[in-house]
Amino acid sequence: MLRREFLGSFAASLVAPVLPLSRGEKLAQAARAQIGVTISYDPSYVRLVYPNGDVPRSTGICADVVVRACRDAIGLDLQQLVHEDMVRDFAAYPSRQTWGNKKADSNIDHRRVLNLEVFWRRAGGLLWAPAEKSAGDAFPKPLLPGDLVTWMLNGHLPHVGVISTAKPGLETVVHNIGRGAEETPLVAFAPHPAHGHFRWPS
């Protein structure tokens, strides 16, 4: 009897405890789950339901990867969050200067990377923004799963992705650059200027 109890307790001690996923790990997991589901890229303006509006999951743009990951993983609706913040302070966002908008538009504002960057800054999520031109894989460490990183592709096209693997030197990003959701080594973005590194405030 004692031997059986000992062996049972010994076996139990060998089983590693299952730790709950962090918010960032959930975001990374939800971003990766879009691979093979979102298989095309379509930047068209679409009228969406509000809140929780989305274009068909088979398509979308880079920002849609992030919007879907946030909804699926942590229950945060960037469509609503960005829209409400823009209604409060439209002048803080680049919509008028960049796209000629005169008021907040819940159909498109959350799908624009420049607006997401402003929202994350205002929410306290900015970790780093380059003071000068920096390579697209030169984000200061540590990078963590679920971190949100942005670039200016070819120096002028805003792009966003979710850090999915954060092992130093082997970091990967889930994003949609034109072929649907895919996972790409961070080093592949080296030619494109890094623009920002964000993490949801705890």
Image: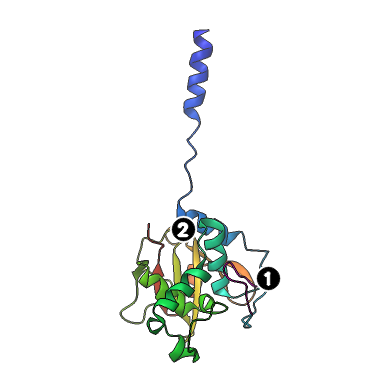
Q: Please provide percent x and percent y for residue 154.
A: 49, 85
Give residue 151's quadrant in the image.
Answer: bottom left
Mark in the foreground, 1 or 2: 1
Q: Position of residue 48 (x, y in %)?
A: 62, 75
46 horizontally vs 14: left or right: right
What kind of element bears circle 1? loop
The answer to whether residue 136 is visible is: no
Q: Hey, which quadrant is residue 195 in on the image?
A: bottom left
Estimate how packed mark 2 is, as few (under 14), some (14 to 19) or many (20 or more) residues with alpha carbons within 10 Å. Answer: many
Label 2 residue SS: loop
In the foreground, 53 or 198: 53
The residue sitting at the top extreme is 1
List x then y, in percent, for residue 59. Answer: 66, 73
**Looking at the rendered structure, which numbered label has been put on residue 190?**
none
Q: Which residue appears at 49% of the width and 8% of the height?
A: 2
Tell me if residue 15 comes above or below residue 132 in the rendering: above
Q: Quadrant of the C terminus?
A: bottom left
- The quarter of the picture where residue 124 lies is bottom left
What span is colored magenta in the figure?
Answer: 47-57
Identity of the residue furthest to the front in this view: 88
Q: Earlier in the sequence, mark 1 or mark 2?
A: 1
Numbered circle sitting on residue 56: 1
- Let me know if residue 55 is in the magenta part: yes
List the residue tagged with mark 2: 145
Query: What's under tag 2, amino acid-wise?
Result: Pro
**In the displayed image of the protein, which residue is found farthest to the left?**
131
Residue 202 vs residue 166, the one in the foreground: 202
